[in-house]
Image: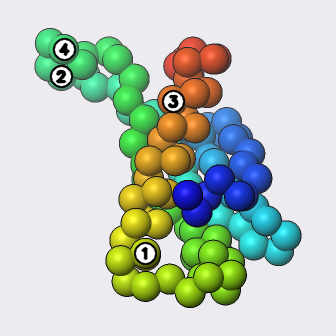
Amino acid sequence: MYLEKFSTKISLTEHGYDIIYSEGEFTGTVSYVRYVSEVGRVMKGKPVYLMTNSDMGDIIECVHQKSPLSSEDFTTMNMEIRTHSRTLIDEVISQRGPQK
């Protein structure tokens, strides 16, 4: 809804992925780190990607300038940042396979 208008770039980092959103001078980054569980029968040895950082203030400001956001809109946008970035990560992983 809000984020579809922004261009995105996915960068491989030392520990996972960064998703960079941009439009003009506005940029934002969401970072995911690869974690491999060493315990448990089900998840042991399987990679999981955890969102560890979200610096999306400029992107939120860009959206707010175009159409003022209510407090409910901010909540919706926060959830969209989480789901949209995770969907992009899942797409990359399904195409490239998990990081080694």
Q: How crowded is the residue under tag 1: few (<14 C-alpha within 10 Å), some, or many (20+)? A: few
Which secondary structure lies at badge 2?
loop
Q: Position of residue 2 (x, y in %)?
A: 58, 63
Nearer the camera: disc 3 or disc 1: 1
Q: Amino acid at mark 3?
A: Asp
Pick the front one: 28 or 5: 5
Q: Amino acid at mark 4?
A: Val
Q: Residue 73's mark?
A: 1
Q: Which residue is mark 3?
A: 90
Is there a contact, CB below 8 Å, between mark 2 and mark 3? no
| Mark toward the start of the polypeptide (2 vs 3) | 2
- Give the vertical position of 47 relative to 69 (above or below): above
Query: Within the image, what quadrant is residue 97 found in?
Result: top right
Q: Amino acid at mark 2?
A: Val
Which secondary structure lies at badge 3?
helix
In 3D space, how far apart are the residues under numbered discs 3 and 4 (Cα atoms)?
20 Å
- Give the vertical position of 95 relative to 12 (above or below): above
Pick the front one: 34 or 73: 73
Query: Which residue: 44% across, 53% down?
Result: 82
In 3D space, how far apart are the residues under numbered discs 2 and 4 (Cα atoms)?
9 Å
Nearer the camera: disc 2 or disc 4: 4
Q: Which residue is mark 4?
A: 42
